[in-house]
Amino acid sequence: MDNISPEELIRRTHMGIARLRESQRQLVQDIQERYNELGMAVDQLRSYFNSDSGEDQNSPADDKNCRESKRKRRQSCALHLNDIARPLSSDVVSFLQDRQYGFRGRSRYSQSRSQFLRKQLPDFVSQHLPAILSEKELVLGTMNKVFASKWLNDSQVVLGTKCNKLMVMDVRNNDLVHIPSLRSSEDSVPADCPCGIHAIAINPSRTLLATGAQNTNDLAVYELPTFDALCVGEDAHKDWIFDMDWVDDEHIVTGSRDSTVALWRVNNQSPSLVGASRSVGHSVIKPCQVKPCNRALRVRALALSRNTRLMGVLSMDAKFHFWDLGRFQQLETLDLPWRRENVCVASSDELGVFAVGSEAYVTLVDHRLKPSAKCRSLQIPPRFRERGAERGIRSLSFNENIITIGTGDGRLLFFDMKNNKFLLQMDGKHCELQVGEGWLRNDSNYRDHFLHGYYPNAIYTHCYDEARARIFAAGGPLPAGLYGNYAGLFY
């Protein structure tokens, strides 16, 4: 060994590795051939057990009952043979091929597989899912308009209505459970003209749920999954709470029609929550900070971008306000290009952008770009040909690279950010899901003012389940004077 040059040593090493790989490839080939032979044998046995030919029919001793008994036994054996499937060989071959490249190569393979399952597969599914979804309309009874919704688990959705009801619906059997609203203390001054529940938020660990209290300018927090009353947040807002979102497991932000935003700390282990108010039966908390949103006329919606640590706040005067989440400080205000009906906002942590819905456009806002390029708009395809028939965008969400758009005329549309176009069907038409008729109260107001009009259900809220395979959509008639509701599951 001492007389072998480094070059010769390297050459011999490479030859040894080559021979090893060749032997492993031969082993893989042998295993494939053996499993193919086994598969052929299984097929022959399965064919025999499924057939009625053979000695049963030739034996005069077999009567009809005996042949039937043998036929059942053969079917049982055939079902057992179905468990002996050829895909087993592909698992063995795949394992040996992984081993061929050593632990480092297998690690790269595992990382590639993980990336495929985590990113590429969900992206593919999000692009092709809408075309195969069908609607199952759900019955809500006589409630008025659903404004907010969130999936609790695989079968239950929590929703908030204009008539200030918090409900839990089982989408499998349409069961409804009413969750009592939390009362504020006597020190709380309620807002005028209660508007109902506009927002529901669940913290990242899914242990707490926040929504509006009985006084619609106060915050209510429940423990999950039991919906035990935890606390009510007071002394932050003088008008309705329009939106809210959790910063982390303990901190939540609320935005109100009085043009303020508030930061709260909620911790069910905190000593400050001990000593519940005797008048309401649960704790009362105060905000950590309350700040006015400068240049904002009524905060309408908000969304958080956790990767960039930014909060986007939408006001009803068509302005979009960036806030620093870490310092809870307003950074910048943008004038949106479309002035009418800016009512909803969504954010994507992966893409780092916000989406704002207006009367006929979705405006994409990116804080990272220079001021002249921060906003980009896309127009939704109209449902009605007549001018002025747009009924606005009422809800937005991101699913991977797809923006899901809920409209005021009862449609769900899908825009592909990667390809910069709306999803299309096989016939070239826009891929859209249309909601059902829902329920509409036939009262004197309807008969006097709306009897001869057509009023599709607006999709005020929609949400994907955890697997991103089903969409719950809900809402009701768009005119404020109409009383009705809609809920449906697309699966």
Image (cartoon, helix red, strand yellow):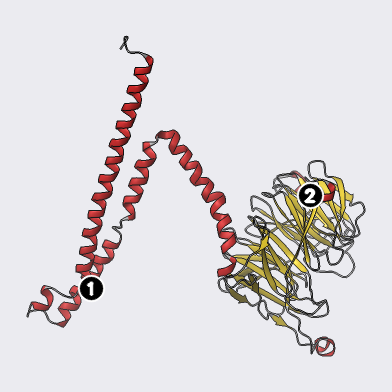
The mark found on residue 311 in the picture is 2
Label 2: which secondary element: strand
Residue lying furthest left? 60
What is the three-letter code of the residue carrying label 1?
A: Lys
Quarter occupied by the N terminus: top left
Q: In this view, does 359 lie to the left or right of 432?
A: right
Q: In this view, does 59 lie to the left or right of 219?
A: left
What is the three-letter code of the residue carrying label 2?
A: Met
Residue under the image location 83 percent in, 69 percent down: 195
Residue under the image location 60 percent in, 73 percent down: 175
Q: Can the viewer see residue 460?
A: no
Relative to 321, say whether 404 is above or below. below
User: Which residue is at the front of the view, 218 or 429?
Assistant: 429
Q: Can the viewer see residue 393?
A: yes
User: Which residue is at the front of the view, 153 or 82?
Assistant: 82
Relative to 63, say whether 263 is above or below. above
Q: Where is residue 366 in the image (x, y as percent from the top left)?
A: 77, 50
Marks 2, 1: nearer the viewer? 2
Locate residue 354: give its quadrant. Answer: bottom right
Q: Where is residue 9 in the image (x, y as percent from the top left)?
A: 35, 18
The mark found on residue 72 in the picture is 1
Residue under the image location 80 percent in, 50 percent down: 374
Q: Where is residue 208 in the image (x, y as percent from the top left)?
A: 68, 54
**Mark nearer the N terminus (2 vs 1):** 1
Instruction: Give the crowd class for mark 2: few <14, some 14-19, many >=20 residues within 10 Å.
Output: many
Q: Are marks 2 and 1 in contact (CB under 8 Å)?
A: no
Q: In this view, does 351 lie to the left or right of 375?
A: left
